[in-house]
Amino acid sequence: MQRIINFVLRYRNAFLYAFFAFISLVMTIRSHSYHQSKFFNSSKWVTGSIYGAGSDVSSYFNLKDENSRLVDENRRLRKLLFNSISDTITASLDSTVMQHEVLSAKLIKNSYISPRNYVTIDKGARDGVHQDMGVITTDGILGIVENVSNKFATVQSVLNTKSNINAKIKGTEYFGSLIWDAKDYTVVQLVDIPRLVPLVVGDTIVTGGMSSIFPENVPVGTIKKYDLNDSKSFYNIDVELFSDMANIKNVYLIENKDKEEIQELEARTIE
Amino acid sequence: MNNTVIINIFRFVLLVLTQVLIFNNLNFLGFINPMVYVIFFYWYPIKVNRAVFMLTAFLLGLTIDIFSDTLALNALASTTVAYLRPPVMRFCFGVNYDFQNFSFKNTTKIQRITFMALVVLIHHLIYFFFEILSIAHILLILKNVFVTGVVTLVLCILFSSLFSPRSE
């Protein structure tokens, strides 16, 4: 017994190291396969507030660019509005029949070079944000809300090896999954598009309506290059993103009001 | 003694803030975010309780992980560096290290840079390997380790000569 105790005491540092390494390894491996940790993430009060303070300072540096981008978007939306038939405007602007609710938020922490990127936004449960809302930028998609605290939320970016978003080729109903191989932050991969689909480099990829997270036809990017996968029956498509992931400030959160109903129905069907 | 503790707590907080607010947003050349907080392991007093050192390293890593949503990658790399620091020091500074009054003052610049380079190398190897955890990405891992490592090392050398602690 004495010997065992002596042995432990002699190698206490090694044991301590093994203990810490074990804790960190478990957390690391969990983060590869499961959802982001509920307790340790940057949407929490302390981390969120510090990022908020940092972003308050740095947001002044590109205020001008950001403004012109927002004005540009407004112009585009106005154009759409004025060019649609006037009757349908008032009908479609009636909020009781609208299927999607849109919130706006600011990015307080951006990240795009790690294999599992999460960004943090300055809206939380207090403002009506909840898990699994779709997040888009002015130009295209950004990701899905993962964790929410009272004032902040973390978003799992499309640039995350765990991300898997339903997408299709614009104008057709051929859909596949959008994934990321962690190599280039301007390019994501679209898989499971069958071989018989005619593809052209430059085709637009949009979100498919299958997931009830994003509405249908939100722009994603254009086809950069494509080839067949190992089984020669599906395409692997490299999609160049419309959103400049390195330069995002204002984002929109989309809520599908019918989502609960859809999910409930699906759950009942499986039973 | 008490003074050292306060200085180290101060360093801890300052390095975390510098890392998460400045260096994590650097994105130099599109993929380089130097991990400058590694210099903590160079500045930390030499003759100390190793258990306390490892605990501090673990907490430092974990704090940065929580900020950057890379749960436990930094903690794992930091703890390993803390655990391996004495053998690395013995390797770099030779028998001098075993003397009671050993300090960085009586070492050469080359020795100190070698030490820092080894610390950065160990840290980055573990960090980037466990970040992707796939042999298929080995080239990406090595590229990241090498390029980010060099930038981190250069910044660490700059920092260490800018803010060299008087006590050591």
Image: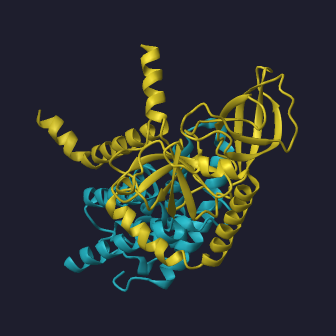
Chain colours: A yellow, B cyan
Q: Is residue A116 visible?
A: no
Q: Could you say which is closer to the camera, residue B12 or residue A86?
A: A86
Residue B99 placement: quadrant: bottom left
Q: Is residue A2 left or right of residue B77?
A: left
Q: For the view shown, which residue lies furthest in the left direction? A: A2
Q: For the view shown, which residue lies furthest in the front direction? A: A87
Q: Is residue A194 left or right of residue B86?
A: right
Counting from the top left corner in percent of width and height, residue B155 is at: 56, 73
Location of the N terminus of chain B (image quadrant): bottom left
The residue that appears at 25% across and 77% down in the rendered structure is B6
The residue that appears at 29% across and 56% down in the rendered structure is B55
Location of the C terminus of chain B (image quadrant): bottom left
Q: Is residue A69 left or right of residue A117?
A: right
Residue A122 placement: quadrant: bottom left
Q: Could you say which is closer to the camera, residue B143 or residue A4?
A: B143
Q: Could you say which is closer to the camera, residue A79 or residue A152?
A: A79
The residue that appears at 67% across and 65% down in the rendered structure is A74
Q: Is residue B61 left or right of residue A239?
A: left
Counting from the top left corner in percent of width and height, residue B66 is at: 39, 55
**Count of numbered labels shown in the rendering:** 0
Q: Is residue B97 visible?
A: yes
Q: For the view shown, which residue lies furthest in the top direction? A: A271
Counting from the top left corner in percent of width and height, residue A255 is at: 50, 45
Query: Compared to B153, does B86 lie above or below?
Result: above
